[in-house]
Amino acid sequence: MTDLRNPTRRPAGTLLERANPLSKLAAAAAVTLAVLVSVDWISAGIVLAGELLLLPLLRIRPLVLLKRIWPLVIAALVGAWGTALLAEKTGTVLLDAGPVLFTSDSVAAGIAIGLRGLAIALPGIYLLASTDPTDLADALAQKMRLPHRFVLGALAAMRLVGLLVSEWQSLGMARHARGMGADSGPLTRVRSFLGQAVALLVQAVRRATRLAAAMEARGFGSGGRTWARTSVFTVLDAWVALYGVLLAGAALTAAVAAGTFNFILT
């Protein structure tokens, strides 16, 4: 709960939770740009390693993180396998089993794609895990001067993410209680998933419509606006942004020094 007697106070928590959301966005943008600029496993690996070093600051255990992002890990593995299988077959032959041919260069390309995917996804996960939506809205409106309607819409969307997750679980239990999807066949499972997804979409549209009408009725986005607390930058924010910039620079420098730098447009 915000102490209105001290409007610039940030809630207690980890270092990343106390940092201004804009400084975390700046750091995330820096490391993401570094990963996007070059398609190589060294720069992506260094960025990913630097991101994993921040886990203690979030107080998230590696197994807990893995449980949260396992779909991303699977997607990264599939992407790495597909890239290694279809990439140009240059370099030393590592495996030649008929249609399956892996070379040193194709495997390096696959590893680079897998690491890049994880390195791009983790900053977003960290940002969501360490940022209060209201703090982000305050920073966007006060520091970046974004329109109030856009900021309030983004705030409402972030607040509704947790509700959508719980509604998805409730819809699943309701469908199981009615005997829908009892057949374990793959086609039935796909139909059940699509039906549940459509139902969630309808629920989300209805909830968003009601929320928009309620916000409009309360005068959001019209007239002058005051703030319960002021978004401020501190020395911690400078260190957070600097960490992202230094990590991005170190990753690209290492890739150039190792000769693996591969500009994305070449």
Image (cartoon, rainbow, N blue to C red):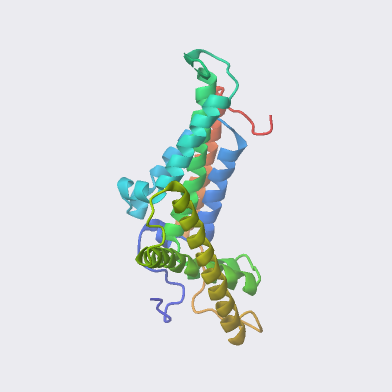
Which image quadrant: the C terminus? top right
Quarter of the figure with residue 148: bottom right
> Is residue 28 among what the camera can see?
yes
Along the line of sight, which residue is nearer the eye, 156 or 97?
A: 97
- Which is nearer the eye, 79 or 190? 190
Q: Can residue 41 be seen in this view?
A: no
Residue 222 point in image, percent of width and height: 66, 82
Q: Which of 233 and 263 is in front in this view?
A: 263
Relative side of 239 to 178, left or right: right
Which x, y percent locates residue 186?
44, 47
Above or below residue 44? Residue 54 is below
Q: Is residue 129 positioned above or below 67 on the image? A: below
Above or below, 83 against 189 in this view is: above
What residue is shown at x 64% (from left), y 79% (from top)? 221
- Please provide percent x and percent y for residue 100: 50, 20
| Horizontal side, residue 182 vs residue 198: left or right | left
